[in-house]
Amino acid sequence: MPEPILLTPGPLTTTRVTKEAMLVDWGSWDGAFNALTASVCRDLADIAQAGNTHVCVPLQGSGTFAVEAALGTLIPKTGKVLVPNNGAYCQRIVRILGYLGRKALVLDFAEDEPADPECIDAALLADSSITHVAQVHCETGTGILNPLAEIATVVQAHGRRMIVDAMSVFGVIPVDLQTMPIDAVIAASGKCLEGVPGMGFVIAERETLAAAQGNCHSLAMDLHDQWAYMQKTGQWRFTPPTHVVAALRAAIDQYKEEGGQAARLERYAENCATLVGGLRSLGLRTFLDDMVQAPIIVTFHAPPDAAYDFAEFYRRVRDRGFILYPGKLTTVDTFRVGCIGAIGAAEMRRAVDAIGAALQEMGIRQPGAS
């Protein structure tokens, strides 16, 4: 039986070439593996247009590990962080800052509303004690895209520092660190680069990182220590996710062969359009306006029908070869469908058919929200 297609924001469906890259065992201190790590870091930095101003620091673990490492390392213990909040992953940043003992000021927006640069400007003007802004580029809880370039310009105008969680859009929505005043961009292996989960990374401004010694709350999460050790030895401090790095090397090679950022964005945008058009034709309604929808994951209102049950809906769609994602909203009943991974429009059309068949089997006559 074929593997199900993952319509999720990561882990996601990968190519056979990426999977096969994990069939080789690597010595963690071996020169060949060190060269592999260095090549991956160079290419990740290049994707973000890092130039000579920023460096890529890899870290074992999921994307959230890298977010915590960046916040804990790059924000001094005396810092105060403004968090524009329009979803679950913004709220996770606030929670991390609480664990770290860093002061946070939350600027709330509706879950279907992008972070507003003018509101951020006003918040920074009103509170001179704010040292940093932590911004989620794409809030994966809904799929909303926040206006990163405009926000970065506002933050720079106030002389504050900016850290960006670009987890779900890195490699697809452009980030140019030579033109955007950003201290650090955080992402992970198992997202739009189509690697496998297990490695986060932070592309940080070199001078900011060099000045961050002693900030971190944790040895394992200390990006400065990881960077300094890798600069000295070429090695990871602690046992690296060797197979994950090898898979990411293969995935980046395929990313380049496809045509890089522009080509990947084009494919995902086609996936998203196919999905949205297909499910709207079934009567389902998207949570977000098209103008703020990133082509990464789409949130749909659950059918307002007594026959609808997500667990049963999920099971029936999975039986047809597709894995969906539950909703992340607290006030509205939704489900989410990812558009990323090693898939194209043909797979999205089949997914639409599977969802339609599942709803029909469940006897749902009111797929559209009222």
Image (cartoon, rainbow, N blue to C red):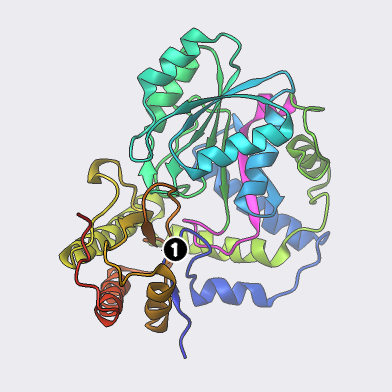
Q: Quadrant of residue 95?
A: top right
Residue furthest to the bottom in view is 1
Residue pointed to by mark 1: 325
Q: Name the residue nearer the viewer: 79 or 222.
A: 79
Relative to residue 187, is residue 144 drawn left or right? left
What are the residue bounds of the magenta stretch?
A: 190-210
Q: Measured along the vertical axis of the image, is residue 234 above or below residue 354?
A: above
Residue 319 appears in the figure: yes
Q: Position of residue 76 (x, y in %)?
A: 72, 23
Q: Is residue 197 magenta?
A: yes
Q: Crowdedness of circle 1 by 10 Å Cα count: few (<14), some, many (20+)?
A: some
Seen at 65% across and 73% down, the residue is: 22
Residue furthest to the front in view is 306
Q: Quadrant of residue 245?
A: bottom right
Seen at 48% across and 73% down, the residue is: 15
Residue 322 appears in the figure: no
Relative to residue 27, is residue 137 drawn left or right? left
Q: Position of residue 157 (x, y in %)?
A: 46, 12
Q: Position of residue 288 (x, y in %)?
A: 29, 46
For the C terminus, the quadrant is bottom left
Relative to residue 243, is residue 128 drawn left or right? left
Q: Is residue 224 magenta?
A: no
Q: Position of residue 197 (x, y in %)?
A: 60, 61
Q: Name the residue nearer the viewer: 283 or 222.
A: 283
Residue furthest to the left in view is 281
Query: What's the residue type where badge 1 is placed?
Result: Tyr
The image shows a total of numbered marks equal to 1
User: Could you say whether the residue bearing mark 1 is in a helix, strand or loop?
Assistant: strand
Q: Quadrant of residue 179?
A: top left
